[in-house]
Image: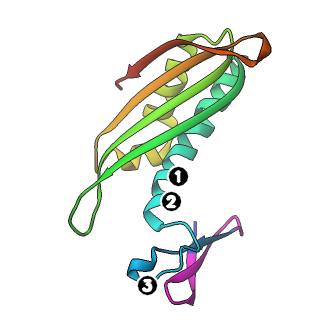
Amino acid sequence: MDAKVIWQGRMSFNGRADSGLDIPLGTDPSVGGDNDGARPMELFAIGLAGCTAMDVISILQKKRMGVTEFEVQAHVERADEHPKVFTHIVLEYVVYGHEIKEDAVVRAIELSATRYCPAHAMMEKVCPIEIKYHIYEEKDGGDRSLVVSGEFTP
């Protein structure tokens, strides 16, 4: 994989990798930016959440789980001092659907965390990653009820 960033002026850049898609990068006005793009460290968190989300939804679809909505939230703590590295990550998997089996969700998370997700494999080498999940049942009329919440430890 190759990636590059091209300076657009002030503290604004345009990032591009092999996909050819442009990603605007920017920063806060307090450090000379214009709030015109994602922060580079945000992209690490988005990349981790996106990588594992793609694994988990793919596995749940193969298991024919009736997922209607799905998200992965990455809650990241950072060091106070420079270089302000990640110090702790909590990944929360939120699954909505019909008759979603907890064991299927846990197995999908396990496979992503221990076998398939390169972002998880890299990040866990530098800081602890805690994993939580919540499964909601969709009811008629759009109501949802929490079926189960849990934690997964690889």
Give how far apart the Cα atoms at labels 3 and 2 are.
20 Å
Please check the rendered image and state whether residue 15 is part of the magenta-colored stretch, yes or no. Answer: yes
Residue 20 at x, y percent in the picture? 71, 69
Give how far apart the Cα atoms at labels 1 and 2 are.
5 Å
Q: Residues within 10 Å of mark 3 (few under 14, many from 20)?
A: few
Q: Report the label total.
A: 3
Extreme residue toward the right, this view: 141
Q: Choose between 133 and 115: the one closer to the eye.
A: 133
Residue 44 at x, y percent in the picture? 46, 57
Residue 19 at x, y percent in the picture? 70, 64
Looking at the picture, the colour scheme in use is rainbow
What residue is pinned by disc 2?
43
* Earlier-in-chain disc, 3 versus 1: 3
Q: Residues within 10 Å of mark 2 (few under 14, many from 20)?
A: some
Camera-near label (3 vs 1) is: 3
Q: What's the residue type where badge 3 is placed?
A: Gly
Q: What secondary structure is the stretch in magenta mostly built from?
A: strand
Residue 15 at x, y percent in the picture? 59, 74
Range shown magenta:
4-21
**As displayed, is residue 136 above or below residue 81?**
above
Extreme residue toward the bottom, this view: 9
Q: What's the residue type where badge 1 is placed?
A: Ile
**As displayed, is residue 97 above or below residue 35?**
above
Residue positioned 23% across, 69% down in the render: 82
What residue is pinned by disc 1?
46
What residue is pinned by disc 3?
32
Quadrant location of the C terminus in the rendered image: top left
Residue positioned 53% across, 79% down in the render: 34
Q: Secondary structure at mark 1?
A: helix
